Amino acid sequence: MRATLLSLVLSVLSFSAQAADWPAVDPPAGYRLLGATQPGQGACSTTPLCTVETLLACFSRRDEALCRAVWPAAPPGVLFGAEQRRQAYWWSWRVAEVAPLGSGEAEIAIAGRHCGLLSQAEPVCRTTPAPATRYRVSRRLDGLGWQILDWRSPTEANLN
């Protein structure tokens, strides 16, 4: 009985420690701005939220190195090929939902909105955010940080 109780206590403590890693949901008007690189701002995988933000920065800044730092399973040659000629852009986003999926894994839903090209001096955000994209994150196998496993954007069928 003591072993069962000890096992239960350790499980609860382990879950609590992992739950502390998950970000809080932002209020509906609580948007963050992502744009030009700031000094010291690079790839980050120390927390689940920092890992998702690094992937968002990869796309916003058109910086493949940021993608590869947090998304090890990225298929070779699909990021920013010749067919993708979009310019870097400002992106406003917030954490819309967090769903723990098991030990060291969660899905973080990000609602975002385009705020213009980075060539603009100041961002001009659209008032209506896009439907949330869901990013699945997990601890790295080596235990040193977090990684993006995959993500899914809403489909047309989900938008109606």
Image: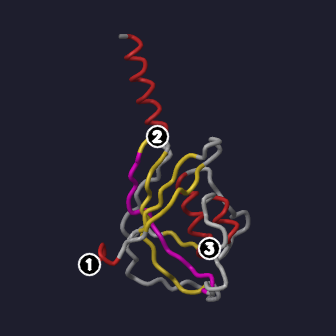
Residue 140: give x, y in percent of width and height.
60, 46
Q: Is residue 107 left or right of residue 51?
A: left
The magenta segment? 86-101
Work out how far the residue at label 3 is from the one at label 1, CA to CA, in angstroms: 29 Å
Q: Is residue 43 left or right of residue 116?
A: right
Residue sitting nearer the eye, 122 or 109: 109
Furthest toward the left, the residue is 160
**How crowded is the residue under tag 2: few (<14 C-alpha within 10 Å), some, or many (20+)?**
few
Residue type marked 1: Asn
Q: Residue at x 65, y 44 (%)?
A: 144
**Could you tell me which quadrant the C terminus lies in?**
bottom left
Query: Is tag 3's residue or tag 1's residue first in the polypeptide sequence?
Result: 3
Task: Please tell me whether mark 2 sits on a helix, a strand or a loop.
Answer: loop
Mark whose residue sits in front, 3 or 2:
3
Location of residue 96 by image quarter: bottom left
Whether the residues at callouts 1 and 2 have beta carbons within 8 Å, the answer is no
Q: Residue at x 65, y 42 (%)?
A: 142
Whether the residues at callouts 3 and 1 have beta carbons within 8 Å, the answer is no
Location of residue 141 by image quarter: top right
Q: Residue at x 58, y 82 (%)?
A: 89
Give the label on residue 78, or none.
3
**How crowded is the residue under tag 1: few (<14 C-alpha within 10 Å), some, or many (20+)?**
few
* Total tally of numbered discs in the picture: 3
Furthest toward the front, the residue is 76
Residue 112: give x, y in percent of width and height.
45, 73
Whether the residues at callouts 3 and 2 have beta carbons within 8 Å, the answer is no
Residue type marked 3: Val
Task: Please tell me whether mark 3 sits on a helix, a strand or a loop.
Answer: loop
Give the label on residue 103, or none.
2
In the displayed structure, would residue 16 be above or below residue 43?
A: above
Residue under circle 1? 160
